Image (tube, rainbow, N blue to C red):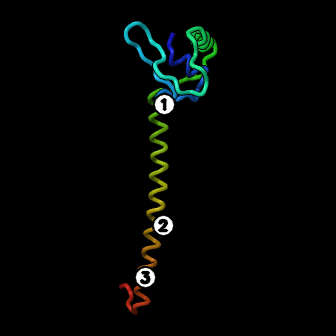
Amino acid sequence: MILYEAIKYKYPDADPQKDFELRNDGAGSYIDEWHLDVPKPTAEELKQWWEKSQINPRYQPPLPLDYLAQEVAKEKLMRKQLEQQCDLLTNELEALKNEILLFKGESET
């Protein structure tokens, strides 16, 4: 039985870095810390969740390549948005510069 998969089957939104911590000291895995607002599951409950997860898997961790592709797509979108903001600010600064020069009676050649 894989405890992580059993817990994620029952609580798919649970974050293993803040909601629970698993540990294995050589005698098998166990829940070391449990921070969800529900009682810590018993060994029997974990076993049932594990068996159900094998019959009807709910949680499918993303493949590393899929995850990286999603992250790259997000980064590209953010970069494009930043470039658009930069262009907009550059145009605004150029317009302000021209207004200042016009006010001073100078013109850009």
Q: Amino acid at mark 1?
A: Lys
- Quadrant of res 86: bottom left
Residue at the image position 51 percent from the left and 23 percent from the top:
34
Going by the numbered disc 3, the residue's amino acid type is Asn
Vertical arrangement, residue 4 with respect to residue 82, above or below: above
Q: Position of residue 84 (x, y in %)?
A: 48, 60
N-term mark: 1 or 3: 1
- The alpha-carbon separation of the residues under discs 2 and 3 comes to 15 Å
**Label 3 residue SS:** helix
User: Residue at 35% across / 85% down in the picture?
Assistant: 109
State the residue in front, 2 or 83. 2
Q: Earlier in the sequence, mark 1 or mark 2?
A: 1
Q: Position of residue 91 (x, y in %)?
A: 46, 71
Mark count: 3
Secondary structure category for the residue under label 2: helix
Disc on res. 88: 2
The amino acid beneath tag 2 is Leu
> In the picture provided, is 13 more to the left or to the right than 104?
right
Residue drawn at (56%, 22%) of the image: 8
Element type where label 1 sits in the image: loop
Residue at 45% over, 46% down:
75
10 Å neighbourhood of mark 3: few (<14), some, or many (≥20)? some
In front: label 1 or label 2:
1
Q: Return the mark for residue 81.
A: none
Q: Residues within 10 Å of mark 2 (few under 14, many from 20)?
A: few
Residue position marked by numbered label 1 in the rendering: 18
Name the residue tied to disc 3. Answer: 98
Q: Is residue 7 above or below residue 97?
A: above
* Gap between marks 1 and 2 measured at Cα: 40 Å
